Image (tube, rainbow, N blue to C red):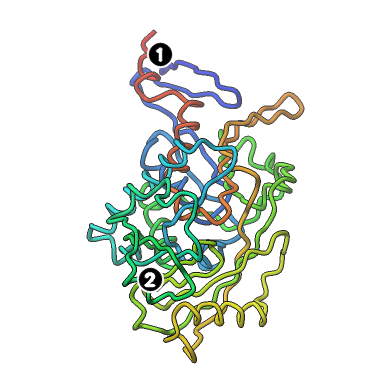
């Protein structure tokens, strides 16, 4: 008979054999979009004693992330310290920059992109909170601003861009290669996972309304128009965030809209016309450009990101949960940083292999 040490956690038991072998901890990640996949990938890379299953009704190319332009230009989140937001963006930028400088760049769809963020009047802070993280940040000179006669101030810099149609499948592939798996189904009740999984990581975005009763999360509809304009090499973003031009690998993304509490996935003709008109005003060469497709995504938005531990209780049963959702329009700019935070929270729920080995010898 093999001697075993029993280590009890809120909802699961670890059995450590006399040889120090560790039974894998089963982790379910709800959500197969950008945040869910990056969190799952981070867990598989950081916590080898966990087995990760991503459960989602939708995977790429049918996620909100597939609609986004994927350009790393962050905005601020209320309720979260600026120090934390800087850390999230830097972690994300550094992670993607490393990929962009590797042989994986082409497959992952990650590349550097330079351009301008322009303002009709100078902002209160001419140097943004993230200016030292991107590359070559500087204020635009008068000669450059001649290109934008309706604007009086601008910032020039180089950042990173993710082609979601490549980046999301690339993450799926890496999760599988790390021993994780993907499961296509809708989780109707989180308690259905109890007994099969030891910990649930919630990256369900808008699904958190029904699954976890979070009525504070709401959609902000974003519509973009993808066009064929290969001569556009630099991004242009109006400082108010409502109008942007982001050249990508397969086309140029023009945007956008921000319509709160709009649950419609159907493109609006008038919105597309407005997007084209505004973008043509910034870049006249876009007049008459061929349209590839119109896309709509619902940004999962709340007053602040929810990244925290939770312990559900029902009929004397407990289910540990890590929440990581509510990124709104800042998912690409912060996804790896928040994935690392969620992974650290998960690590706090379970012992490291070293600690388990130590306990097994007591």
Q: How many marks?
A: 2
Q: Residues within 10 Å of mark 2 (few under 14, many from 20)?
A: some
Question: Does residue 166 lie above or below 228 as drawn?
Answer: above
Q: Residue at the location (67% across, 78% down)?
A: 268
Q: Is residue 317 left or right of residue 42?
A: right
What x and y, as percent, mark residue 3? 42, 15
Q: Is residue 177 left or right of residue 335?
A: left
Question: In the figure, residue 73 lies in which quadrant?
Answer: bottom left
Q: Residue at the location (68% across, 42% down)?
A: 190
Residue placed under numbered mark 1 in the picture: 359
Residue placed under numbered mark 2 in the picture: 145
The label on residue 63 is: none
What x and y, as percent, mark residue 20? 35, 21
What x and y, as percent, mark residue 120? 50, 66
Q: Residue at the location (33% across, 48% down)?
A: 133
Of labels 2 and 1, the one closer to you: 2
What x and y, as percent, mark residue 311? 64, 29
Foreground of the two, 13 or 334: 334
Separation (CA) of disc 2 from disc 1: 65 Å
- Closer to the chain start, of discs 2 and 1, is 2
Q: Residues within 10 Å of mark 1 (few under 14, many from 20)?
A: some
Quarter in which the N terminus is drawn: top left
| Label 2 residue SS | helix
| Label 1 residue SS | helix
Q: Is residue 127 visible?
A: yes
Residue sitting at the far top: 362
Q: Is residue 70 left or right of residue 319?
A: left
Q: Residue at the location (40% across, 42% down)?
A: 44
Quarter in which the C terminus is drawn: top left
Q: Is residue 197 visible?
A: no
Question: In the figure, residue 329 lies in which quadrant?
Answer: bottom right
């Amino acid at each position: 008979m093999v001697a075993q040490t029993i280590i009890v956690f809120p909802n699961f038991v670890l059995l450590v054999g006399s040889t120090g072998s560790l039974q894998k901890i089963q982790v379910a990640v709800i959500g197969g979009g950008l945040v869910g996949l990056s969190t799952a990938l981070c867990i598989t890379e950081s916590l080898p004693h966990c087995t990760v299953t991503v459960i989602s009704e939708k995977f790429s190319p049918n996620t909100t992330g597939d609609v986004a332009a994927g350009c790393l230009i962050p905005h601020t989140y209320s309720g979260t310290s600026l120090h934390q937001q800087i850390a999230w963006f830097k972690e994300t930028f550094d992670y993607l920059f490393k990929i962009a400088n590797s042989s994986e760049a082409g497959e992952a769809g990650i590349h550097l992109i330079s351009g301008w963020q322009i303002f009709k009047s100078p902002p209160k802070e001419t140097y943004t909170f993230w200016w030292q993280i991107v590359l070559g940040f500087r204020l635009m000179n008068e000669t450059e601003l001649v290109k934008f006669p309706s604007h009086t101030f601008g910032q020039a810099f180089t950042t990173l861009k993710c082609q979601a149609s490549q980046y999301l499948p690339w993450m799926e592939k890496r999760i599988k290669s790390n021993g994780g798996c993907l499961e296509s189904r809708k989780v109707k009740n989180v308690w259905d996972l109890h007994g099969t999984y030891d910990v649930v990581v919630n990256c369900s975005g808008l699904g958190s309304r029904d699954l976890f009763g979070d009525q504070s999360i709401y959609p902000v509809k974003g519509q973009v128009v993808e066009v064929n304009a290969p001569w556009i090499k630099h991004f242009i973003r109006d400082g108010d965030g409502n109008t942007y031009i982001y050249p990508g690998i397969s086309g140029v993304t023009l945007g956008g809209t921000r319509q709160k509490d709009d649950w419609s996935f159907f493109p609006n003709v008038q919105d597309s016309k407005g997007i084209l008109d505004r973008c043509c005003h910034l870049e006249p060469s876009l007049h008459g450009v061929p349209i590839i497709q119109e896309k709509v995504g619902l940004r999962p938005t709340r007053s602040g990101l929810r990244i925290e531990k939770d312990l559900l209780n029902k009929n004397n049963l407990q289910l540990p949960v890590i929440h990581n959702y509510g990124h709104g329009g800042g998912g690409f700019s912060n996804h790896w940083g928040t994935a690392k935070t969620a992974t650290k929270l998960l690590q706090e729920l379970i012992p490291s292999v070293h600690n388990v080995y130590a306990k097994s010898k007591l």
